[in-house]
Each structure stands twice: as structure tokens, then as C-alpha cells.
Image (cartoon, rainbow, N blue to C red):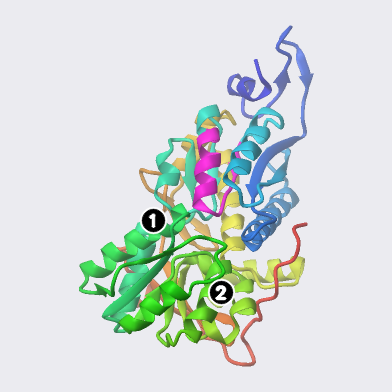
Amino acid sequence: MSMRRFVAVLSFCSLSWMSACNGEPEAVSDTILVGEYGSLSGSEATFGQSTHDGILLAIDEINAAGGLKGKKLEVKTYDDQGKTQEAGTAVTRLITEDHVVAVLGEVASSLSIAGGRVSQNYNVPMISPSSTNAQVTEIGDMISRVCFIDSFQGYVVGKFAYDHLKARRVAVMFDQGQAYSTGLKDDFIREYTAIGGEIAGEPQAYTAGDQDFSAQLNAIAALQPDAVFLPGYYTDVATISIQARRAGITAPLLGGDGWDSSQLAQIAGESIEGSYYSNHYSHQDTSPAVQDFVKKYQAKYNKTPDGLAALGYDATKILFDAMERSPSLDGKDLAAAIAATKNFQGVTGLISMDENRNAIKPAVIVKMQGGIPTYVTTIYPKGTEPAPTEVPPVTPPTADTAAPVEPATAPH
């Protein structure tokens, strides 16, 4: 009997480990080990670094408050380098070698799918902080997430483009090799056309890491769309935005949460100014939960937290909340407790899991202004819009009050 399996037959308070050969106690650990896998290096490294920082901040707070039944939480982290195969290998190691009770990760949906299949196979719960493709939680009952999904994100961007920007014709350019980009492209097209919008021409495909996008951008420029939807990751989006302006495209660019990195403005410069993307939170939200988090994060890391950091923090806090409610740390019990999460006040909103273990929550739209993702509006799931007095107050920044977004640093 493995250590992880044996936890199922112990009382929650003891969490003792027993030897497979004689049934006698081997050791009583004073820590509970949680696994994390993420892109700490590679082309989307700021995703993994921000998430990791958010996770560590949450664990520090949990341990400072006494941990779980007197036991401290500890995280074991592996860098998957942004590679699908490495993601699966990392989760396998976390479960079979490190014997973690749960896994946190990933950001990129393709990597969460790879790691999630391993977690499901071993019956170890996994929470994705920020993978928005629907396929992630469709893997099985061990997989949950604390972010909204792309069907909602497609609705958010489509509604904003049509209602707020008055854009009636939108061109689309997407990464054909990423589940996140292809899925969000389909969701946006469905939602935007359903409310009366028109897709200008055929969606233009590219592959992550390409350097020359002139063929796709020249085709889009000839269509003269009101906006261009780019559901990709910040590395490619930054390069595309520079080349789009050179191609004569002056329309605003639109994107999803894959844009959320301080590197976007640093690479793209003025080319990304005046463009918009959907995100999970805004650091400019004046609600106590957000501002308390921003203050603690800045004190620890000396930079402003992005949405990935906030989601990493929320994922860890939700996991800990489920641990406290679960009758044991056995995989099935813990996964059920995570799935039962209702009205959890996170940094990224009030979080409840639906029947498919996806978070029900609003999204924000931010505008790139002076290199800063600046809050524009909040868009809620259909039928859940609060009365005006219930909307959390958000104060647009001024030149004196806008918090700078510092470059991401190496993980701690």
C-alpha cells in the first residue's frame, strides 16, 4: 500500500503513514506536500513565474496562520518548460515519486490537459489556476479550475466589441497549435456573430514562434475590419501587434487572458496601445480583497501582481479551504470537497464551482494605456448581473496613482 493510498483509511487528524510490509507506523510527517507544475522557463515563462509567486504567497499566509491541523503546507515545483510532454512527466513525478496530495497547474490549456490526464489516472486532484479551454475539466472528476472558461471569455470579448466599441466587422487571427487559442477563437466567433457581429474574411492561422506574419496581416489589412481578435499568448501577440501596425492596421486589437504579462507592453511598445483584453481581475479594483492582496504581493515581490499571480493565489486558498472541509486527504474525498466550493471570496471574485468544476465568476476588460492594463469594465455571466450598487467600485488610475507593472522576476 502506497503512502498516498493509505491516507484514505486514516482519520483526518492523524494523517499518519504506514509501512506496506507490517502495518506499523513508519513516520508521522509534520508537513502536507502539494505539487505544482508550470512554465518557469520557455516562451511563456512569466505565466509560470507569476503563478508560482501567487502560490508561495498563499502558502506563506496559510502556514503563518497555523497550517492545517498543526501541519505546514509545502509545495514541490517542477518546470515543464512550456512543453506538453514535460508537463505530463512533471505530474507523474509529483504523484509517483513525491507523493503529493494534490496538484496545482497549469496556465496553458494544452499543458493542463497533458498533466490533468495523469492526475485523473492516479486519482489525485488537480486545480488549474488559469487554463480556460473547456477540455481541461472534461478530463474527469479529479480536475477543477478557479478561472472562467473560454465559452464565457468569448462572450465577454464579443459583447464588449459589439456593445462598447461598436465594432460590427472583426477579423480573427489565431495560433493553430494551441488548444487555448483555437478554442477561444471558436467561442468568440460563435458569441460575436450571435449578437449581430460579422467576421471579416476567413480567420488567419499562425504557429507559435513564427517571426513573419506579413501574409496574414496583409490579408486582414485589405479587409479594413473594425477590430482584430488575437486569442494568443503575449509573446506572439507582441510581435504580431508590431507587424500589424507596419501593415497599416490601425483598428484596435482584442485578446483574452493569454495577453496578461508585463512583457506584452515591454515588447510591443506603442503598437499595443489602445488595444483591449479580457482578464480575471484588475489590480486597480478598490475592493478590500484585491487591495489587500496587491499590498501583500508588492511587499513580498516588489512588483504589481498580474491576473496569473492572483489566480495562483486563489487556487491555493481554495485547495486549502477544501482540505479543511474534506473528511480526509484521499484523492476522491479531496476532489469532492474542491468541487463543492461555493461562494469563496477570492481575489479574482466570488468563486463557486458549477457541475463541471468550472468557476462561475465575472471577467474584466482592460485597455493597454501607457503600457498599463487599465480597467475599463466588468462583464458578468448572463443572468447574474448585480444591481448597480453591488458592483465593486473601481477607480481608474491617474498619472499619479497608476501602479506600474514591473517586469516579472525569476521564481523564488
Q: Residue at x 43, y 38 (%)?
A: 139
Q: Main secondary structure of the magenta part?
A: helix
Q: Which numbered circle lies on residue 239? A: 2
Few, some or many residues within 10 Å of mark 2 (<14, 14–19, 20+)? many
To which quarter of the image does residue 17 belong? Answer: top right
Q: Is residue 193 above or below residue 116?
A: below
The one nearer the camera, 46 or 160, is: 46
Is any atom of residue 289 visible in this view? Answer: no
Residues in magenta?
A: 102-119
Judging from the image, what secondary structure is the residue with disc 2 in?
Answer: helix
The one nearer the camera, 221 or 1, is: 221
Image coords of residue 268 (percent x, y): 59, 79
Q: Residue at x 67, y 57 (%)?
A: 42
Image quadrant holding the N terminus, namely top right
Q: Of callouts 2 and 1, which one flags the residue occurring earlier in the amino acid sequence?
A: 1
Q: Which numbered circle lies on residue 183? A: 1
> Does the magenta-highlighted stretch encompass residue 113?
yes
Is any atom of residue 363 visible in this view? Answer: yes
Residue type at the position of mark 1: Gly
